[in-house]
Amino acid sequence: MVFQPGERLHLGAEAEVWSGLWMGRKAVRKIRRKRGWRHANLEKRLGFRRLLSEARLLIRARRVGLEVPAIWDVDLDGGTLVMEMLPGKPLIEVLRDENITLEQITSCLYNSGALVRRLHRLAITHGDLSTNNILVDEDFNAYLVDFGLASIDYEIERFGIDLHVIDEILGASHPSIEGAIDIFLKGYLDEESKLGPAKDQSGGVVPTAASVMKRLEQVRSRVRYHG
Ligand SMILES: Nc1ncnc2c1ncn2[C@@H]1O[C@H](COP(=O)(O)OP(=O)(O)OP(=O)(O)O)[C@@H](O)[C@H]1O
Ligand SMILES: [Mg+2]
């Protein structure tokens, strides 16, 4: 299907992201960049696998109504995904906006935490939970993108790591927002109280929000201890 490119939104080490139109709808195309230094064949297989896994997990999350982009086209050979363009901008930019109020900061962090819990309840860990990969719209609703490192998990460790990654990033890049992580974690915990215990998934039992929080504490003290 034809994607009509608009402008380049992002040029990273792994991917290039363009805005544009697909079937008349606002879309983005993510192209996995080829990296010369890897063996061409291996590169192809790894690229295939990651792209396929990204598409699969986004579809899985979207199917049950999570705020992630709908996937509209996958081209494994070309290494591209075409997906719905989400509204809003990255959380990192929202938090750096000088005109944002404390109340608005609170709602976007809280909503982000709640959304991450809903993702975890599907046994999906994100794998790269940075403030670049959370988008926030005008009403401070949160959306998740970039599932290239996401996976299906039942072991608690990767759930804890997800929270630890966002914890470190909020502490390092937004130190002026005091207690940012606590607002995020309140959203994470409250979501579980609202929704009740998570349903068992096909592969097993998802760790509870409370147990993931406990794991976060362990990861934190491990990091403190080992430096
Ligand atoms: N569906 C979407 N709607 C709106 N913006 C998007 C969408 N997907 C990605 N973006 C924007 O493009 C940026 C980069 O996309 P993404 O995070 O998927 O690439 P990446 O894997 O991080 O690339 P790299 O690792 O090379 O930096 C995001 O941070 C976001 O700002
Ligand atoms: Mg990203």
Image (spheres, rainbow, N blue to C red):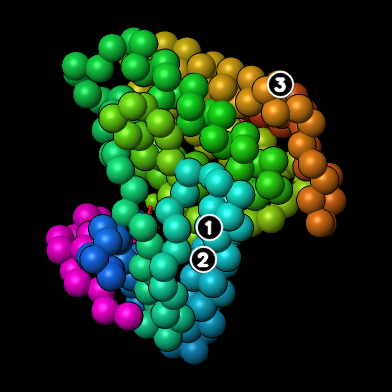
Asked if the residues shown at circle 1 and circle 2 are in contact, with their CB atoms under 8 angstroms apart, the answer is: yes
- Is 17 included in the stretch rendered in magenta? yes
Q: Reading the chain from its start, which is encountered first: label 2 or label 3?
A: 2
Give the left or right position of residue 170, taking residue 151 as reference: left
Give the residue drawn at x 28%, y 70%.
23
Q: Position of residue 60 (x, y in %)?
A: 60, 58
Q: Main secondary structure of the magenta part?
A: strand
Q: Is residue 74 above or below residue 184?
A: below
Residue for badge 3: 193
The secondary element bearing badge 2 is classed as helix
- Is 144 included in the stretch rendered in magenta? no
Q: Amino acid at mark 3?
A: Ser
Q: Amino acid at mark 2?
A: Ala
Q: Position of residue 173 (x, y in %)?
A: 35, 28
Q: Is residue 222 visible?
A: no
Q: Is residue 199 visible?
A: yes
Query: In terms of depth relative to the viewer, which is nearer, 50 or 190?
Result: 190
Q: Reading the chain from its start, which is encountered first: label 1 or label 3?
A: 1
**What is the spatial separation of the Cα atoms under label 1 and label 2, in whole angstroms?**
5 Å
Local packing at callout 1 (Cα closer than 10 Å; few below 14, some 14-19, many 20+) is: many
Residue for badge 2: 55
- Magenta stretch? 1-20
Give the residue drawn at x 58%, y 18%.
186
Quarter of the image where the C terminus is located? top right
Farthest residue in the bottom direction?
Answer: 41
Q: Position of residue 127 (x, y in %)?
A: 56, 49
Q: Is residue 102 above or below residue 87?
A: above
Query: In terms of depth relative to the viewer, which is nearer, 220 or 160?
Result: 160
| Tally of marks | 3
Residue for badge 1: 58
